[in-house]
Amino acid sequence: MAKNRPQTREKRTKRNRYRAMPIDVLPDDVLLAIFDFCVDPGKVLPFIYGEPIKERIEVWQPLVHVCRRWRSVVFGSPHRLNLRLVCTDKTPARNTLDVWPALPLLVFGYGYYPTESVDDIIVVLKRSDHVCRINFRDVPSWHLEKVSAAMQEPFPELTELLVWTNDETVTVLPLPDSFLGGAAPRLRRLWLSGIPFPGLPKVLLSASHLVTIHLWSIPHSGYITPEAMVTALSTLTSLGSLILDFESPLSRPDWESRCPPPQTRIVLPALTYFEFKGANEYLDDLVSRVDAPRANSLSITFFNDIVFDTPQFTQFISRTPMLKALMKARVTFEVGTARELDWQVSSLEQVCASCLPPLTTMEDLYIYERPFWQPHWQDNIENSLWLELLHPFADVKNLYLSEEVTRRIVPALQELVGGRTTELLPTLQNVFLEGLESSGPVHEGIGQFVSGRQVTGHTIAVSRWYNSKLGKI
């Protein structure tokens, strides 16, 4: 029987190289690198409207329960490991918050939670030096009053704030001017919905790093004049997205006190998206004081009015390169925006004719109703109103019509015969119809329009359009 040969030094070295070693022999910097890899999923968490995954943010917590050394390593590098605590209306903060070091706090509250839960949230808010994110969604007014009363001190570390009330039938008391201590120097994202906050301009002036301001359903009790709003926006050189959504048509400038356009305007160099809902006079006053050279997307909704006169808005578009060169336009109809649909069509025609400068680069025009907010269509809308609505879009090449809109616009196009065939949409090349029928009045009507264009040497292709109900427009 042969004896086992002794292992050579080379083989022993190779074997030892792959031998498992206890983790506790690793130096602290190596442990920290491993921990950093383990908690990485908790580092990048974009702001969302729903409740965050608590375990994802607090993925670091199991590490501190292993041993004292690991606990020391984790708490010794809170910034590198992005240590944060999530406090919700289900967190017993009064009993557990003191267990942890002074870490950044993320505070979330939702709906009709019990009074004792509000008390727990208030305990967290009193540590204003450490709160970096607040999200209160669907908060009833009586809870909001208690919460806002606890937020009268400055929040120096706050970067994101969302407050959303659901009390549509209750008058929500305005947030006091002392809310956030009147200052939030690190705030980057601000969302308010249904919240009157007359003192907002003061906070905006202190938050020079704001990237997003979304103000939805601004009650009339929270009305801020265009002049005050522009002053508040004047220092926000990083602002990229701005939404001003007024709830009441009463929120408009006093006609007698309106001033002529200013000689100088503020510049919002980073603004790319602007959404507005309100009185046309307010919009005109606002944009007469603003330049946004990088703006590339607009969404405008006006309240019902008799006259739409917005010369300053027209000039704002004309002096904004990417808006003047827009390639697409969307005209939408929805329930609740007008008493009668013919009023909507007439108002839209006024807005398009009087507010828009010549859009020579416009190639695609979509006309449709909101999938979930479809209006109650009437059959008494005059064909001339539809033709007037289309008139400002002289350079459109591609026209997209939803099924309901098709049934109303096609009969109007049928009236364009003889020399009138090319007086409207003279450069039109393609028509995309949702629910295109192989026969029937709509098919016959669009056929007559296309045939009339062919006589003049202008060919139009008609195709089926599938996307309007899917929102892919």
Image (cartoon, helix red, strand yellow):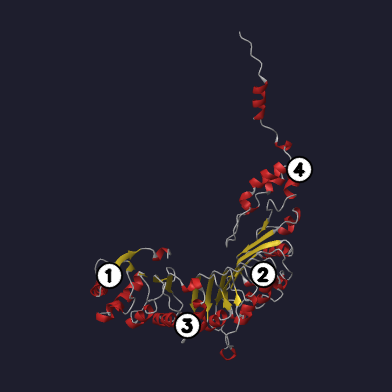
Q: Nearer the viewer, mark 2 or mark 4?
A: 2
Q: Which residue is mark 1?
A: 459
- Which type of secondary structure does the marked residue at label 2 adopt? loop
Q: Which residue is mark 2?
A: 208
Neighbours of disc 1 within 10 Å: few (<14), some (14-19), many (20+): some
Image-quadrant location for residue 426: bottom left
Which quadrant holds the C terminus? bottom left
Amino acid found under the numbered disc labelled 1: Thr
Label 3, label 4: how far apart the Cα atoms are:
67 Å
Amino acid found under the numbered disc labelled 2: Ser
Label 3, label 2: how far apart the Cα atoms are:
35 Å
Which residue is most to the bottom? 256
Is 414 on the left or on the right of 357, as rendered? Answer: left
Q: State the mark number for residue 205.
A: none
Please say if 66 is above or below 457: above
Is 334 on the left or on the right of 282, as rendered? Answer: left
Label 1, label 2: how far apart the Cα atoms are:
54 Å
| Front residue (pair 142, 421) | 421
Amino acid found under the numbered disc labelled 4: Arg
Label 1, label 3: how far apart the Cα atoms are:
38 Å
Q: Nearer the viewer, mark 4 or mark 1?
A: 1
Q: Which residue is mark 4?
A: 69
- Which type of secondary structure does the marked residue at label 4 adopt? helix
Point out residue 256 in the picture as x, y percentages from the top left corner. 58, 91
- Which type of secondary structure does the marked residue at label 3 adopt? loop
Which quadrant holds the N terminus? top right
Neighbours of disc 3 within 10 Å: few (<14), some (14-19), many (20+): some
Residue at 72% x, 38% y is 26
Q: Nearer the viewer, mark 1 or mark 2?
A: 1
Q: Are marks 1 and 3 in contact (CB under 8 Å)?
A: no
- Which type of secondary structure does the marked residue at label 1 adopt? loop
